[in-house]
Amino acid sequence: MRLAGAFSAIASRYGQVVAVEKDGTLLGYGRAVLRPVLDRQRQFLPTDLGLARQEETLCLGEAGLPFADQAGAWVVRQGETAYDVVNLRPVTAGEETIYWRAVLRRREEEMP
């Protein structure tokens, strides 16, 4: 079994279906394991109006997700929640991409 196949089995069991967008265009769907990042940074940051929550999430996505090492406004959507991609890189073994590792920042809910 290839390493990417082993990770896909983990993502199918523990992950959620996510949509990947770049510059406002939907590129495709896949599975990813999303977990909050709580131990590295403060979740509440000071602003001019007081404290604001800045929620970051670690995303481990299948190798088949339509990410690429290109600049652009990458967005990951899981259900009703949208995340901006802060950091993105492939995790590889030799020439094989095993999975994508991304740090996501949750978007604020837009008021209608």
Image (cartoon, rainbow, N blue to C red):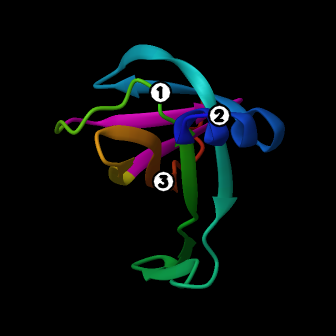
Which element carries disc 2, helix, strand or loop? helix
User: Which residue lies most toward the right here?
Assistant: 13
Dot 1 corresponds to which residue? Answer: 65
Q: Is residue 1 visible?
A: yes
Which corner quadrant holds the C terminus? top right
Instruction: Please tell me in which quadrant of the rendered image residue 53 appears.
Output: bottom right
Q: Amino acid at mark 1?
A: Leu
Separation (CA) of disc 3 from disc 1: 15 Å
Q: Which residue occupies 56% across, 59% down? A: 58
Q: Is residue 32 visible?
A: no
Q: How many marks?
A: 3
**Residue 61: x, y in percent?**
55, 40
Picture disc at residue 8: 2
Name the front one of labels 2 and 1.
2
**First reached walking from the N terminus: tag 2 or tag 1:** 2
**Residue 13: x, y in percent?**
83, 38
Q: Which residue occupies 41% across, 24% down? A: 21
Q: Which residue occupies 56% across, 19% down? A: 29
Separation (CA) of disc 2 from disc 1: 11 Å
**First reached walking from the N terminus: tag 3 or tag 2:** 2
Q: Image check: 25 left or right of 31?
A: left
Which corner quadrant holds the N terminus? top right
Residue range highlighted in magenta: 72-85
Instruction: Please tell me in which quadrant of the rendered image residue 5 appears.
Output: top right
Q: Nearer the viewer, residue 35 or 93?
A: 93
Q: Amino acid at mark 2?
A: Ser
Q: Nearer the viewer, residue 65 or 75?
A: 65
Dot 3 corresponds to which residue? Answer: 104
Which element carries disc 1, helix, strand or loop? loop
